[in-house]
Amino acid sequence: MASEASRAGTASGGPSAHLELKGVTKRFGAVTALDDVGFDIPLGTTLGFVGENGAGKSTLMNILCGIQRPDAGTFVLHGEPVVLAGPRDAVLRGIFRVYQEQSLVSVYPIYQNLLLGLEDRFSRFGVLDRRAMRAIAKRVLGDLEIDLAPDVITGSLNFGTRQLVEIARVVAQSEVLAIRYPLVLLDEPTASLSGPELDLFYRIVDRLKTRYRASIVFVSHRLEEVLRLSDRIVVLKDGRVVDRDVSEPTEGKLHRLMVGRERLGDFYAVGRQRTSAGPPVLRVAGFTSDAFADVAFEVGEGEVVGIGGLVQSGKTELGLALFGVMEASGSVEIAGVEVSRASPAARIALGAGYVPLNRHRDGVMLGRSNLENIALPSLDRFSRGGIVSGRAVRRMAEAQIERLNIRPRDPDYRTGALSGGNQQKVVLAKWLAREPKLLVVDNPTRGVDAGAKEEIYRLLRELAERGCAILVISDDLVELIELSNRLFFLSSGRLSDPVPAPAEAKPREHDIVSLMF
Amino acid sequence: MNRLAVLGKLTPLLAALALFVFFSVMHDAFLTWPNIWNIVRQSSVLLIAAMGTTFIILIGAIDLSVGATMTLAAICAITLVPVVGEAGILVGLLVGAACGLFNGVLNAVLKLPSFLVTLGSLFIFQSLGLIVSGGRPIPWTTPISSTLAGGVVFGSFPKIGLWAIGVLVLCALFAKFTRFGQTIYAIGDNERTARMSGIFTTRLKVLTFVLAGAISGLAGILLGIRTFSASPGMGDPFLLDTIAAVVLGGTLLTGGVGGPLRTVLGVLVIVILANGMTLLQVDPFFQVGIRGAVVILAVLITGGRRRVDEIVK
């Protein structure tokens, strides 16, 4: 094992390509996820990967880190062909993946997570040498200027900080394994970072390159970020590389390559923003919980109101509390009815709907069909005397699948097997089927590709045009500004004054970002 | 759907058929009408009891008190007959429902794990059964109900089999076509999502336990009629057999997948296996072990757990 590790580190002569992939193909049953994919990563560069959901980015990452094996193709690491035996083999060869879904053991202190999987190097007769582990952890955190004590229990950290621990793990492990040139796979690492956390993240990535000689593979849906961080951008579409080095990349150009058509000039359909709002559908006053205090605002008919803030600002909790899933005191009126003590079911009956941040936990039944998922909140409307009318439900589900362009267009398809964007559309379909009067959406386009994003923005506009009041909670500042009529920011649980965002005079990002702190 | 998944779904059916053919070839007495009626008689009570367990497992819970509920319901029913007449038997259903209500409230309202709740109630119900019966078997002599559920019909078909078929049909229709049935699957798949889609999950979980309790009560009464007595411990063997039957049929312990029509197959596998092994005079010391091996084998094939990253606890 040790010899493998040192081999990766002693690739002499500094070969120009860190990793080279040729003809990589991967099939799952009848589906070809990757088709003859080839590219190379020059040593010490950042390679950005973009593509729609289902373009093959996740499969590619899985192959790069040894979780999946390609059906065909070669893998040349530091000029030497290799076959990765598994994720551990990849790590020993200096390939580290920073996961989108975090892979930390929450009950461990930070130092144990930094060295997770390498305990054998720190133990004698099965007893861990915690002092040595702490020392390494302390040094690595110091080098990266991450202000954390190694003994802190990982589960007590917030999401953004845990992401930093994940990255620090790469440095700690490559030191222990004596890897000279680590290859770091960053898979949607910034999906939940904002503000200062994001800046710290950029700084750390930069340090990985300059100080630790790392090459980086970067996958993200945030195109502006890919443009900012990458030295070279590869575009994947339908499992094929359509461009292995985009020249003079711009967001528009990347979008065209990914989707196969021009990005609409008006991506957020701002032209369809309503200029006046009707009477209030949602009215909140003195709303207080563990996460926020004394929140008050209104959302009118046909109005889109945005709520921004840092990850721990309490904005997600606000959405959950508005829907009755989380404890809070104060007054909430939906369509003129006081609901602060009411169940989610009662709020739904008044016309409310909620698209959650955590889709898999709160939004869909992964094991059931699209039809069952879409029908779930509407079973009352399709049953008489407790008997569900299967035919009416099917007609309704088919209509929604058609309307939202959910693919595959099969009401009996298992929702868990859909791509993220299509799953999100299923969640929207659940509520659209009820013609909601109030829709609360938390990060409606998280993990959703550009094409589906456009569709979701148009759906939200369409709902607003029909008089639905929409509350958008989002980490994506641009999305928030462009969608909303007015926006608020939550900062340490307090709501800011409203910022008007009329279609003809949208506030600029850097003018309002200070409201988040 | 890929071929493996189809095979997995068909496993219980194929297993039942294979056992049927195997024993038919191995022993002349197996494929005879008297023995087939025997199998019907042996599977009826188990099938009914397993219907209740199916719904409990579908919502992702477990009920360890099935057997104790059956016993308590039967003892209460037969004890009341001399006092209020034969209609007292219906009290057995209420007792079963009350047992379910107790489990359901502790699990769904007070949010205690169903495993622990029903482990505790198993002992409590056993104790109540001993207290009511005085610890002695009570002879079951009720002319009207015995006519309804005992003996045979259409020449030689055991009447109790008709009860089992009736309960099965009702449960299958209930699971597939009612709003309640649909929400049982929703709760089993993802309770949070169900609640956030406007389902009254707490209420429905309690009701599921009540329904399962009432079904257990019915199973207890029919067992009393079939064995002509109600005695402490009469329901005990049904606890493990019902769970085995539900799991054999392919209903997942994690909830949300499976249903009554699958459980029938599990029941048939268990009963045919026991019946056939007895005919072949397999050493009883071996019989129980073989049954266990079949359960594990069937789950192994049915599950189709091939994903490396799946974690099983």
Image (tube, coloured by chain):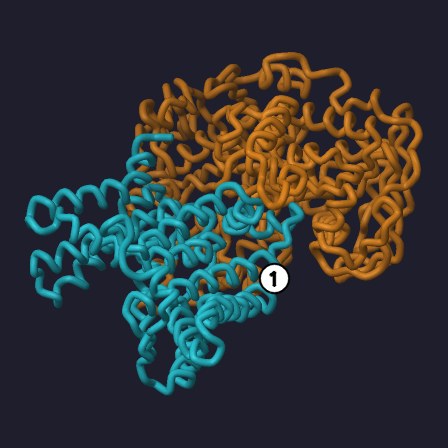
Chain colours: A orange, B cyan
Q: Is residue B282 above or below residue B307?
A: below
User: For residue A430, which quarter of the picture?
Assistant: top right
Q: Is residue A431 visible?
A: yes
Q: Is residue A124 visible?
A: no
Q: Is residue A180 left or right of residue A385?
A: left
Q: Is residue B174 left or right of residue A475?
A: left
Q: Position of residue B193 (x, y in %)?
A: 60, 47
Q: Is residue B79 above or below residue A244?
A: below
Write down the residue under mark 1: A156
Q: Position of residue B151 (x, y in %)?
A: 27, 60
Q: Position of residue A69 (x, y in %)?
A: 34, 32
Q: Is residue A178 left or right of residue B137?
A: right
Q: In this rendered view, identify the residue nearer to me: A150 or A324.
A: A324
- Taking the spot 62% from the left edge, 31% from the top edge, the residue there is A425
Q: Is residue A443 left or right of residue A260?
A: right
Q: In this rendered view, identify the residue nearer to me: A281 or B79.
A: B79
- Taking the spot 72% from the left edge, 40% from the top edge, the residue there is A441
- Taking the spot 59% from the left edge, 49% from the top edge, the residue there is A164
Q: Position of residue A125 (x, y in %)?
A: 29, 68
Q: Amino acid at mark 1?
A: Ser
Q: In this rendered view, identify the residue nearer to me: A199 or B102.
A: B102
Q: Residues within 10 Å of mark 1 (few under 14, many from 20)?
A: few
Element at badge 1? helix
